Structures are given as C-alpha cells and as structure tokens.
Amino acid sequence: MTGETTVWASEIPWPPSVNDFFPPPLVEGGGYWLTKFTLFVWITVALLIIFFTIAYRDPKLVPGRLQWMAESIYGFARENVAKDMIGPEGVKFAPYLATLFCFILLNNLWGIIPFIQVAPTSHIAYPAFLAVISWVLFNYVGVRRFGFLGYMKKTLILPAPFFILPLLIPIEFASTFLVRPFTLAVRLFANMFAGHIILLVFTLGGFVLLNASALFAPVSVFSWLLALALTLLETLVALLQAFIFTVLTSSYIQGALAEEH
Amino acid sequence: MDILAIGGNINALAIGAAAIGPGVGIGLVFSAYIQATARQPESSRMTQPFMWLGFALIEALALFGIAFAFVFQK
C-alpha cells in the first residue's frame, strides 16, 4: 500500500496495514525475530506445559478442579475428535490432537486480550508449520499401514470409469497432497489476520474520527461498541479455528487409515 | 484515455468478489441447520459439529480473498 498511507492524526497508525504485524524487536539488540509474537509463543508453550504437569501431578479418583479441567480438555480431544473421527484406533493420536488444539487455541486467544492483542497465529509461519506437521503425520500413517505404493494407489485411484482416471488422478493428487496443508495453514492464518485487521479498523477508526472533529464523538462511540461486539466474534472464531484445525487433521488421518471401499 | 481512468486499488474489488460465494454458502449451511432443527429438534446436538465444520470451511474461502488481497500488492 505504498503511497496510500495518509496519517490524519499524528500518532495513530492509520490505516492499518501489514506493517502492523511486524512490530519492532522487544529489546534493542534482540534481532528482528524477537518480537511480541515470539515472546507469546514461548509463554503459550510454558503455560501449557506448566498447566498439564501441575494438573496431573497427583491424580485422584475424584478429581479436583484443576485435574477436572485438564481431563475435560483432553477428554474432549480424545472422545469428540479422535474417537468420533478416526474410530477406536484414534486414541493413539489423541495426545497430538489435544496438544494441537490447546496450542492453537491459546495462541489465538492472545489476539483478543487487552494490551497483548497479537495472535502469533496471524503470522503465516506458525500455521504453516503446524499444517506441515499434520501433513507429514497423515501421510506417514498411511504409508506405514499400506506401504508407499499401496497408499498412493488407495488415495489416487478411486473407483471410477477408466477413461476418467487421467483427469481424476492429477486432481486427487493435487487435492490430497498439495491443497490440504495449504488450506489448513491459510485458513487459520487468514482468520486471525482478518480478525485482527477488523479490530484495528474499528478501534483506531474511532480515535481517528475523534481527532478529525469532536462532532464525530457519537460515531466514535458506535465504532468502539462495534469493536467490542467484534471482539466477542473473535473469541468465537479463535475457538472455532482451533477446533476446525484439529478436526480436519483427524479427518485426514482417518482418510489415510481407511480401508478400501 | 486518461478521461476514463479509474483510480483506486483493485484489491478492494477482489475482496468484495471473494465474499459473494461464501456469503451464499454460509447462508445455505445455517439454513439447513435451522430447517433440520425445526423438523426434528432432538437432532440439533448431533448436527451441530457439521454446522461448525461447514461454516469454517466455507468462511476460509472468503478469508483467502482478504489474505491474498494483502499479499498481491503493488
């Protein structure tokens, strides 16, 4: 957006642009990578490790609150995601799916907490790597069960009339091996990115309107109320996107493990 | 033909065009859920995961539009 950035108010970064997603480093000599994003990924990992370790430190038959909460989260990932989508052998994947869900959820939620308001998942790198891990997982599981050629045959050659196959096989190949990790990553990234931009527009827009003229005060207040409503929507989107990433990963695993029709 | 030159950013048009299909699609998903629940209220709990799955998959297409509008900048 070169040449279109008109800063109407002196200190408000308006309009919001991609540059808002690349803040300066936290400390002066830290290197370009040590920003709020990196710090909050570290905090997420630390929080998850500490939470689950403490919750399972002394497991009782009648759980206390912390143990109950941890068991609910893991139970949700195991029952409603792994077992529902993959079947009885999905229990093997439940730890990975639970960790994936919690990691993405906590990272998404940093985006709406005041004073932080940066979701590490709004940098394409984090969703991209998570999608690569899921992609390697479902392909490895399929290859391990059917052998490489068997897995390729099962995935690419669908029961269809033989003259359709030259068209079907490239489409299936692209859809299963190329498009899936790409859409997994971009879905999560774009949701977080767009959500952050919308919140920036309405919040900063209120300030810009106020600076432009004091007569705009009611419009500014309306803009801030809308930002509040959109924050609630962002919470829903954060939860939903974490759930969707996990459910789709388990669905791909189920597709890789399924027997021939 | 500078008289007929149109200014502005074409990425904004791209975002608008990308929102048409998902708008119809999400309307279809939620309308199906509402109708199914109206016909048989006990099924609402069972069909709800499919509703959220469908919503997120379709919403992703609209958001691809927004994300790529920022990526493909001059």
Image (cartoon, rainbow, N blue to C red):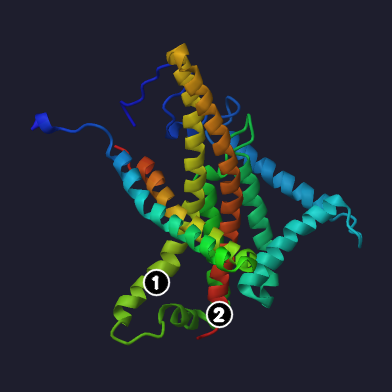
Do the residues bearing badges 1 and 2 touch, measured as CB atoms within 8 Å? no
Residue A69: percent from the left, percent from the top? Answer: 79, 53
Count of numbered circles on the image? 2
Res. A94 visible in picture: no
Location of mark 2 (residue) = A258
Q: Nearer the viewer, residue B27 or A87?
A: B27
Residue A161: % across, % down:
33, 87
Side of B22 where B10 appears, left or right: left
* Residue at (59% x, 69% y) in the render: B40
A120 left or right, relative to A149: right
Residue A129 position in % (x across, y down): 53, 54
Q: Residue A173 is drawn in which quadrant? A: bottom left
Which residue occupies 29% across, 37% down? B74
Residue at x-position 65% and y-position 76%:
A87
| Amino acid marked by disc 1 | Phe
Which quadrant of the figure contains the N terminus of chain A? top left
Give the label on residue A173, or none.
Answer: 1
Q: Can you say whether A65 is above or below A60 in the image?
A: above
Q: Secondary structure at mark 1?
A: helix
Q: Which residue occupies the extreme front position in the image?
A: B39
